[in-house]
Image (cartoon, rainbow, N blue to C red):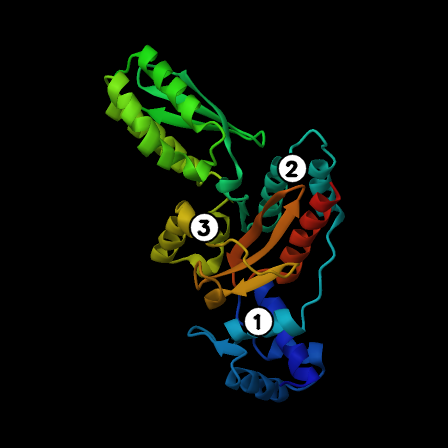
């Protein structure tokens, strides 16, 4: 499709634009490619003609197009070696044998988010694979409580409950006993169905403030079904210059806050390795790139992902995700 000089030219433009966020002109490329400015302009025009580069409205220079980034990722990019500092920060997590696997993944992704300034996503395994082992409720004051849900996998979730009227503590205790009796051993995805058809009729006969309590517990388990979605530093990448439009920022932040939309980031590719979805290739937002991969360790499955601008360090982000997968699999 393109010759070696054109590949070299595209490589320099992509990598310079990733670093500077400024369109690249022909003069800055002459020395690198050892040819005249006129030759560079001709080559840039050709790359623009075939859709790998595009002009901005504010400069005569070029920037990579979405198609250009894709060509760079598929044909030019080489893995980037991690720095000693990167490795040291991540190894403090991987060498901590007291951490559960889920905590190791979460903390390592938090570190990667800090290192790259991209948003980190962890999508744990489906809640259908977790069964309720026990539920407890701890009162904070007359209207606020903490529901503690323990699963058969040893996961513990804390969910705040707000009741808009004062509830007799004995009634709360009775409801918890009824719920435990009927839902222990039930997959979390099926708890709400049991609450509706098995628990609700019982508490309707025995509990005076049944409606308030039923709704509170129903909401707790609805939230728990989405608890396997973790978003770290959603606003990090929005500091980049391409996100200087308030409407664009608000749109993306709203998507990060919607756990159903974030759940759609889950990696469905059956192949192994890290996969890159640039702009319109992902189902999240046309202005971002999503780099993601699956993990499967000791029966735990999920997806880890980095979300950033299309002008992101593809080589470094890919290496970092691969490094996490290699290290958690060693555990």
Q: Tell me if I can see residue 65 in this picture.
A: no
The residue drawn where x is 52% and y is 63% is 310
Q: Mark 3 and mark 2: span between their CA atoms?
A: 22 Å
The residue drawn where x is 46% and y is 67% is 280
Q: Which mark is residue 262?
A: 3
Q: With respect to residue 308, does 182 lie above or below? A: above
Q: Mark 1 and mark 2: span between their CA atoms?
A: 33 Å
Secondary structure beneath label 1: helix
Quarter placement of the C terminus: top right
Which residue is labeled 2 in the image? 101
Residue 212 placed where, x, y %?
26, 24
Which residue is labeled 1 in the image? 70
Which quadrant holds residue 106? Answer: top right
The residue drawn where x is 34% and y is 29% is 198
Which quadrant holds residue 40? Answer: bottom right
Between discs 3 and 2, the one toward the N terminus: 2
């Amino acid at each position: 499709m393109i010759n070696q000089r054109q590949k070299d030219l595209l490589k320099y433009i992509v990598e310079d634009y990733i670093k500077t966020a400024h369109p690249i002109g022909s003069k800055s490329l002459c020395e690198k490619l050892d040819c005249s400015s006129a030759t560079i302009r001709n080559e840039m025009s050709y790359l623009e003609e075939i859709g790998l580069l595009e002009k901005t409205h504010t400069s005569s220079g070029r920037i990579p197009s979405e198609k250009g980034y894709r060509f760079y990722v598929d044909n030019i990019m080489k893995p980037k070696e991690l720095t000693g500092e990167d490795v040291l920060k991540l190894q403090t997590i991987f060498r901590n044998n007291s951490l559960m696997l889920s905590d190791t993944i979460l903390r390592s992704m938090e570190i990667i988010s800090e290192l790259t300034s991209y948003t980190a996503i962890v999508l744990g395994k489906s809640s259908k694979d977790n069964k309720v082992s026990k539920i407890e409720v701890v009162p904070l004051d007359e209207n606020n409580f903490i529901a503690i849900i323990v699963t058969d996998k040893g996961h513990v979730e804390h969910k705040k409950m707000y009741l808009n009227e004062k509830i007799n503590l004995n009634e709360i205790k009775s409801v918890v006993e009824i719920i435990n009796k009927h839902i222990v051993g039930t997959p979390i995805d099926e708890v709400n169905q049991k609450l509706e058809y098995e628990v609700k009729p019982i508490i309707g006969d025995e509990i005076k403030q049944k409606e308030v309590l039923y709704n509170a517990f129903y909401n707790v388990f609805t939230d728990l079904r989405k608890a396997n979605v973790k978003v770290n530093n959603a606003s990090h990448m929005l500091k980049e210059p391409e996100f200087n439009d308030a409407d664009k920022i608000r749109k993306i932040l709203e998507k990060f806050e919607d756990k159903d939309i974030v759940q759609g980031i889950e990696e469905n590719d059956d192949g192994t390795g890290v996969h890159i979805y640039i702009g319109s290739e992902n189902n999240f937002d046309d202005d971002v790139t999503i780099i993601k991969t699956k993990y499967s360790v000791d029966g735990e499955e999920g997806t880890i992902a980095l979300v950033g601008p299309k002008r992101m360090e593809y080589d470094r982000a890919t290496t970092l995700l691969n490094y996490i997968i290699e290290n958690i699999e060693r555990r």
